[in-house]
Amino acid sequence: MAETNYVTQETFEKMKVELYTLKSVDRPAASKAIAEAREKGDLKENAEYDAAKEAQGILEAKIKYLEGVIATARILDESSIDSSRVSILTKVTATNLSTNKTVTYQIVSEKEASLKDGKISVTSPIGKGLLGKVVGEVAEVNVPAGIMKFRIDKISI
C-alpha cells in the first residue's frame, strides 16, 4: 500500500499545475527534440539524440512520481488541526536546551518542507521528535550529531 502524502490545499493545487505543465508543455517539447535529433542522421553516433532520450526519461519519471504523490495525497484542513499537541501543520516554538536558542518551525509534509521558510518535514528527525508533544514538555530528538533536547514553549496554527 502506498504511503499517504499530507499536503495543504495550496500545495495540492501547485502539484496539479506542475503535472499539467509537464504533460502538456514539457512532454511535447521532449518528443519534438527527439524527432529533430533523429532527423540528423546515424543514431549510433548522435549525442543530441541520446541526450534528448535521456531528458525524456527523466521527464517521464517526474510525471510518474508526481502522479503517485497526487494519487496518495490527503489534503489537510487547518481549521481541523488540534493545537494542544504538536502535529502536522502546527507551528512550534521551542527552545534548544543546549544552546538556549529559541526556534519556530511549522511541521509540514515532505513535499512542503523548506528550512529557510521555517518549515520542517514531519518525517525529519526534529519533526518526528516534536510530534505529539505538549507545551512544557521536553522532546529528545535523535539527530546525526547526537541527541538534542527541545522544550516546547508554544504551539499554534
Image (cartoon, rainbow, N blue to C red):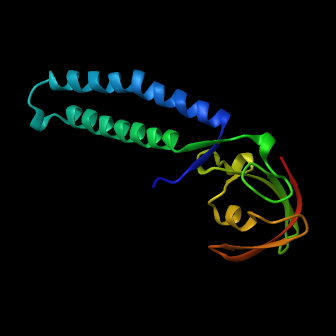
Q: Is residue 30 left or right of residue 137?
A: left
Q: Nearer the viewer, residue 44 or 19?
A: 19
Q: Position of residue 122 (x, y in %)?
A: 66, 57
Total numbered circles: 0
Q: Quadrant of residue 53?
A: top left
- Quick check: 45 left or right of 10? left
Q: Residue at the location (31% across, 34% down)?
A: 56
Residue at 54% across, 27% down: 17
Residue drawn 22% across and 21% down?
36
Q: Is residue 65 above or below residue 123?
A: above
What residue is shown at x 82% (from left), y 60% (from top)? 85
Residue 88 in the image: x percent, y percent?
A: 72, 52
Spot occupied by residue 142 in the image (x, y as percentages of width and height): 67, 74
Q: Looking at the figure, which quarter contains the N terminus?
A: bottom left
In this rendering, is residue 90 above or below 32? below
Q: Left or right: where does residue 16 sit relative to residue 105?
A: left
Residue 130 image-quadrant placement? bottom right
Q: Nearer the viewer, residue 42 or 1?
A: 1
14, above or below 65, in the image: above
Query: Residue placed farthest to the bottom in the image?
Result: 146
Q: Could you tell me residue 114's position as x and y percent?
A: 66, 48
